Image: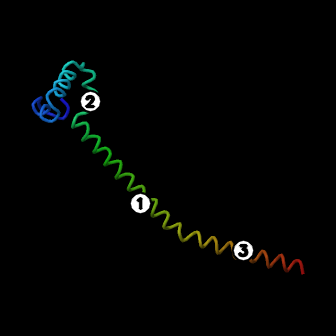
């Protein structure tokens, strides 16, 4: 029943009346509803799955960082090349107009 091993611990934590209500609800609950409750092992499996997913995401993030670091040097090169091409085009147009 919930996180408690027996009703005595539940009574101590919540009080006698609340513990009695909770025990009564769990005794009357059908098996299908009880089967849908998460157990400690279910939570551990979910925790393991989440840790695996977090590790995979961290690997992907590090790969993106490496790719961005390599691209960081490409942008200034293209800008300098574009400025040189623009200057050459301007000189050619001015030479043609004279």
Q: Residue at x 22, y 22 (%)?
A: 25
Between residues 2 and 52, which one lies in front from this camera angle?
Answer: 2
Residue 94 placement (x, y as % from top left): 84, 79
| Quarter-of-image position of residue 79 | bottom right
Q: Are marks 2 and 3 in contact (CB under 8 Å)?
A: no
Residue, disc 2: 37
Q: Residues within 10 Å of mark 2 (few under 14, many from 20)?
A: few
Q: First in sequence: mark 2 or mark 3?
A: 2
Give the residue number, with chain letter if any, for mark 1.
62
Between the residue at mark 1 and the residue at mark 3, the CA separation in whole angstroms equals: 35 Å
Q: Cβ–Cβ below 8 Å for labels 2 and 1?
A: no
Label 2 – label 1 distance at C-alpha: 37 Å
Q: Is residue 3 left or right of residue 80?
A: left
Using residue 70 as the reference point, say whether residue 25 is left or right of it. left
In the picture, the disc for residue 85 is 3
User: Is residue 12 shown above or below 89?
Assistant: above
């Amino acid at each position: 029943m919930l996180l408690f091993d027996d009703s005595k611990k539940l009574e101590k934590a919540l009080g006698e009346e609340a513990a009695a209500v909770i025990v009564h609800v769990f005794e009357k609950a059908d098996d299908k509803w009880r089967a849908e409750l998460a157990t400690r092992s279910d939570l551990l499996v979910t925790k393991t799955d989440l840790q695996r997913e977090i590790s995979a995401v961290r690997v992907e993030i590090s790969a993106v960082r490496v790719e961005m670091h390599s691209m960081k040097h490409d942008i200034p090169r293209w800008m300098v090349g574009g400025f040189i091409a623009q200057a050459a085009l301007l000189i050619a147009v001015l030479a043609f107009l004279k």
